[in-house]
Image (tube, grey):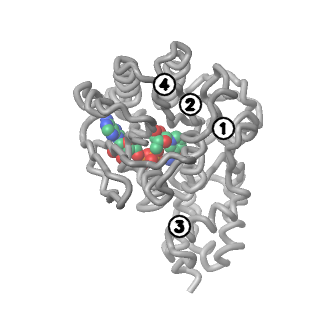
Amino acid sequence: MHILITGAAGMVGRKLAERLLNDGRIGQREITKLTLHDIIAPDTQPTENTSIRPIVGDLSDRSVVERLVAEKPDIVVHLAAIVSGEAESDFEKGYGTNFDGIRYLLEALRRQHYQPRVVYASSIAVYGTPFPEPIPDDFHLTPLTSYGTQKAVGELLLNDFTRRGFFDGIGLRLPTICVRPGKANKAASGFFSNIIREPLKGEEAVLPVAETVRHWHASPRAAVGFFMHAIGMDLEPVGPRRCLTMPGVAATVGEQIEALRNVAGDKAVALIRRQPDPVVAGIVSGWPTAFEARRARDLGFTADADFQAIVRTHIEDEHGGRAPIMD
Ligand SMILES: NC(=O)c1ccc[n+]([C@@H]2O[C@H](COP(=O)([O-])OP(=O)(O)OC[C@H]3O[C@@H](n4cnc5c(N)ncnc54)[C@H](O)[C@@H]3O)[C@@H](O)[C@H]2O)c1
């Protein structure tokens, strides 16, 4: 089995590639090749059973996209994207990757005339206020950002190309992935991860919003689990509405902090510095807080048990089971 991952040097892409290489198979089928594509070179290494074909290039360049599909990968996992903050500040770059990029990719797959499976990373940003709480699966998509609009357009294309029989698509609306490993990034949602990740390292983190702010989270490990499930599952029961809101954990910032305290103690919590930022608070006030995600659960997608489990997963995956602050 040959799997193509776009955005393979990104956070989810790297972790998904590692998991695929570790497992070595999907059900009974051996994974023989990964094509790993990104605009920056992915550093994932091959294994004895699985070769790696790296392709570095811009998804908004049609010639790059033609190369991606030339060998007719059995599974295409489309992760490459300009994330929310940048898609808002750089209109052309956002539409170039998140709109032109997916259209070129789906169109190139159509012209290859073979019906692969396509798994698409969408986002809960396809929803905009006002919305009910929790948001049911059949709620309309009214994005209020360019990023959310681009993801919603991708969902429509995926549905239509699947209906036309060009490929078998499934879209996963991911919760905010928390705790995001690595350095703090500039995303408005970054503080949800920062207030857990930095204290665990013994470093200070800034909290720009009130503790009552509630949001929808999944760990990177759970996100990889969603993609693994989507790659291997029977798509027949999904029906014509091919995009599903993934299950997650609804938690307030206060509950996040208590989870950190329970797992890592008061010393960690003391490193959170409250510094209200009205701009961030304003952005976050328009974000969804909880979802029913019934369809996805019924189809076998599973999330983290609670926010403490998210903190523990981060410590296991990024600190080998014990964070520096716990010493
Ligand atoms: N992380 C989250 O909280 C979250 C939430 C909802 C949806 N998603 C979606 O999940 C996917 C993966 O997220 P992530 O956190 O790994 O993001 P990421 O930013 O870590 O990775 C995205 C990758 O796409 C690559 N990329 C960007 N533009 C490109 C282009 N023009 N051509 C080729 N590659 C390009 C980047 O270099 C990067 O490595 C994205 O589609 C994202 O929109 C993420």
Label 2 SS: strand
Q: Does the residue labelled 2 lie within 8 Å of ligand 1?
A: no
> First in sequence: mark 4 or mark 1?
4
Label 4 SS: helix
Tell which tag, 1 or 2, sits nearer the viewer: 2
175 or 111, which lies in front?
111
Q: In the rendered image, which residue does mark 4 sit on?
A: 154
Q: Are marks 4 and 2 in contact (CB under 8 Å)?
A: no
> First in sequence: mark 1 or mark 2?
2
**Extreme residue toward the top, this view:** 164
Q: Do the residues labelled 4 and 1 touch (CB within 8 Å)?
A: no
At x 51% / y 73%, what residue is drawn? 319
Q: What residue type is labelled 2?
A: Ile
> First in sequence: mark 2 or mark 3?
2
Q: Does the residue labelled 4 lie within 8 Å of ligand 1?
A: no
Give the image location of residue 183, x and y in percent.
41, 61
- The answer to whether residue 282 is visible is no
**Relative to 202, is 81 on the left or the right?**
left
Tell which tag, 4 or 1, sits nearer the viewer: 4
Tell which tag, 2 or 3, sits nearer the viewer: 2
Q: In the rendered image, which residue does mark 3 sit on?
A: 317
Rendered view: 242 above or below 287: above
Q: In the rendered image, which residue does mark 1 sit on?
A: 288
Tell which tag, 4 or 2, sits nearer the viewer: 2
The CA distance from mark 3 to mark 4 is 31 Å
The CA distance from mark 4 to mark 2 is 11 Å
